[in-house]
Image (spheres, rainbow, N blue to C red):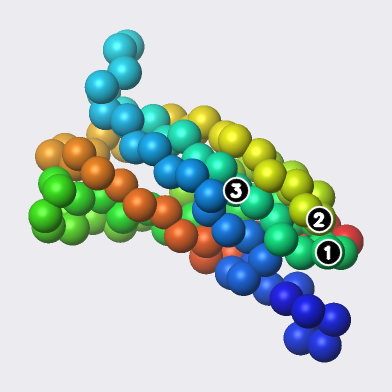
Amino acid sequence: GDWFSGPDPKTDLIITHTEFRTDLEGDLRPVWFMGIQNQSRNTTYDNIVLEATYSDGITVLERDQIVIDQRLLPGQEELVGSRDSSIRKGAIQGSLRVLDANVVN
């Protein structure tokens, strides 16, 4: 967001990296590795809400929300790992997009 429109996490926060892993040992739930960058010059965000889309490589199987408990200062980028809350049967690919986040300042 800019000075006139106010904070907008959908445009300020960008996903710079997404990796959806179903092959890690010890748990049937997949793991997300993601890079999230705050492009705002003056707004800090936390509790980032993402929409996750799961597919079998061709067909979308389901969508869900993931909340990332990460504070991002203006200009900051973080790499985050997060175990999914559920087993995603048949899913081999995933994608993420920002839905919302809490404005800290």
User: To which residue does mark 2 refer?
Assistant: 74
Question: Label 2: how many residues lie within 10 Å, few (<14), some (14-19) or many (20+)?
Answer: some
User: Mark 1 or mark 3: which comes first in sequence?
Assistant: 3
Q: What's the residue type where badge 1 is placed?
A: Arg
Gap in angstroms between the C-alphas marked 2 and 1:
5 Å
Residue at x-position 47% and y-position 34%: 33
What residue is rendered at 70% in x and 56% in y?
38
Point out the tag, 2 or 3, that comes first from the N-terminus: 3
Q: Can you see residue 67? A: no
The residue at which mark 3 appears reads as: 36
Q: Marks 3 and 1: in contact by CB < 8 Å?
A: no
What secondary structure is found at the residue carrying circle 2?
Answer: loop
Q: Position of residue 83 (x, y in %)?
A: 43, 30
Instruction: Read off the residue under disc 1.
Output: 41
Look at 50% across and 40% down and name the residue there: 34
Identified by mark 3, the residue type is: Ile
User: Real-space Cα distance between discs 2 and 3?
Assistant: 12 Å
